[in-house]
Image: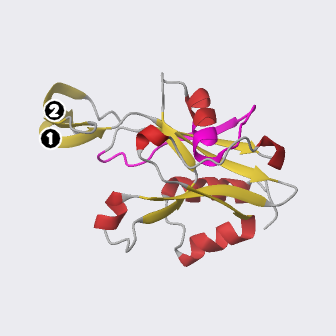
Amino acid sequence: MKYGNVRNIGKELLSDNWYTLHKITFEYQREDGTWETQVREAYDRGNGAAILLYNCVKNTVVLTRQFRMPTYVNGNPDGMMIEACAGLLEKNNAEATIKKEVEEETGYKLDKVKKVFESYMSPGSVTEILHFFIAEYEDRMKVGEGGGAEDETEHIEVLEMSFPKALEMIRTGEIRDAKTIMLLQYAQINNLLRQ
């Protein structure tokens, strides 16, 4: 069964205020061989990386809490989100980016991280691929307070909590961020910590 060829792609820039939003017109070949014209919008904010910091001895994870305007305008009463540390790729290097983000956001300096998977986070409208990592942390790795980069208007609270509490926060709806849920469930499925 062959289908899904694309031809005659046209792009129109709708916005480049923060990142880029394009209107894309194209022809798509259906399964029966006929061609149809489709129009979609695609938001390109670059690719990113996210990480779950975990401590096997203490049975804890490190997460962050920060204000997210898009969630506020979509019904999140205070706009605050509990999330795994994450950031947009710099120089297309996921590993270097996530190590830098961890230090900026949480204050932990990591030597080793392990990439566990990649995912398109919202493939119907956003081009981003997110690279997912895990890393063990210890108290001795704490080199700063974290809180985010001063020049990026970030006001990030660092949260260290038990793994069972983090899993419970998914069930109660206190954690509603997809990347964080995916990483916590990865840890659960792979028995990285005690439940």
Query: Foreground: 158 or 122?
Result: 158
Looking at the rendering, which quadrant does residue 95 occupy? top right
Indicate left or right for 128 with 24 as reference: right
Residue at which label 2 appears? 26
The residue beneath circle 1 is 38
Instruction: Identify the magenta region.
Output: 101-125
* Residue at far top of view: 91
Secondary structure category for the residue under label 2: strand
Let me know if residue 31 appears in the view.
Answer: no
In this view of the protein, which residue sits in the foreground, 153 or 132? 153
The relative height of residue 114 versus residue 64 in the rendered view (above or below) is above
User: Around disc 2, counting alpha carbons within 10 Å, would you say few (fewer than 14), some (14 to 19), or many (20 or more)?
Assistant: some
Q: Magenta segment: does it hold 121?
A: yes
Question: Residue 112 appears in which quarter of the rendering?
Answer: top right
Based on the picture, tell me whether residue 166 belongs to the magenta stretch: no
Residue 107 visible from this viewpoint: yes
Q: Quadrant of the C terminus?
A: bottom right
Q: What residue is shown at x 48% (from left), y 63% (from top)?
A: 81
Q: Earlier in the sequence, mark 2 or mark 1?
A: 2
User: Residue 127: percent from the left, percent from the top?
Assistant: 35, 38
Say how the picture is coloured. Answer: secondary structure
Please report contact status of discs 2 and 1: CB closer than 8 Å, yes or no. yes
